[in-house]
Image (tube, grey):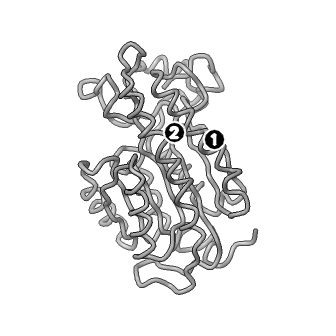
Amino acid sequence: MADSTHFSPYRADGKLYGFVCVVTGATQPIGKAITRELAAHGAACIYACSRSPTEDYAALADEVNKEFPNTQVIGYPLNIANEEDTLGLIDEILNATGRLDVWVCSSGLLGPPSIADTTPGDLQKCFEANSMPPFFALKYAPPAMAKLAIKKGSYSNAAPKDQKYGSIIVVSSVASTYGGCWGPCYTMSSHAALGVVRAGVAVLKGTGIRINCISPGQIDVGVDLKGFDMRGMTAQLPPASLQAKEAQKDHIGLERAGLPTEVARVAGFLASGFSSYVTGANLVVDGGASTMCPLTVPI
């Protein structure tokens, strides 16, 4: 498909210039990095959504707005497991901007490390955080993404939308394809998240809208063991400090843990026209760990 002028990834003003985006889990380290990445490449408007209405979504918006003043970052309190909240967000976006281009689900939950510590309620919360938001995005975002906005909006970095375009990005983990990365909750719900992506290719056939998964491995999110909840009910990823530096050198091709910004760069690629022929993919961002040692994937 030939890109219109407004969708060329080679635009001097940014490969995402004019785009209206949603990032769920934006108050978590990877979500924060993705919000900055989208803003850095010219996105017009980013709804930076919390995982729950009690998180400090407003501070993130203020921080990114100062760094990228031409991008309007809106902190938005979102209950990611609530269908009505998702529909309300989409209505608000269309009323305010008339378009929707990118939806990033980055609201993961780790869950307990063992089945002995796992309750049915824990499992439900992990599915609500890891696989329900991608399902809602697949079900409700595409009709909004298909809407055209021929007239340029009145906000900064606004651009007309003269072709159907949409990219749904699901941030999961290497637990989407491997077992034993942490606990059963994490593995089961991560597999389900990737299942939404794979099912989504057929669902979106003929729409021009793409859906892809990012599966990070061991990512250093800047959390030490002292402040970490080992039940995993408040974290998206375990701290990299759980694995010694020597083990990282032995099992990871790049001999280190990754950074949230390195995951965010992949999201920026999937959001843009540079990935126009990529859909249904699972991009593994683990420094080569799963290739080197697939039976003991370090996370």
Drawn side of residue 273 relative to residue 120, left or right: right
Residue 169 placed where, x, y %? 55, 51
Query: Which residue is nearer to you in this view: 109 or 67?
Result: 109
Q: Which residue is mark 2?
A: 172
Local SS, label 2? loop
Give the amino acid type for the residue marked by disc 2 in the picture: Ser
Residue at x-position 50% and y-position 32%: 189
Name the residue at 37% across, 37% down.
221
Asked if the residues shown at circle 1 and circle 2 are in contact, with their CB atoms under 8 angstroms apart, the answer is: yes
Task: Name which residue lies at 51% across and 73% down.
Answer: 99
Position of 225 compared to 236: left or right? left
Q: Where residue 255 sits in the image (x, y, percent)? A: 53, 27
Q: Residues within 10 Å of mark 2 (few under 14, many from 20)?
A: many
Q: Quadrant of residue 76?
A: bottom left
Locate the N terminus by quadrant: bottom right
Please state which of residues 167 and 260 is positioned toward the viewer in this rendering.
167
Q: Which mark is residue 282?
A: 1
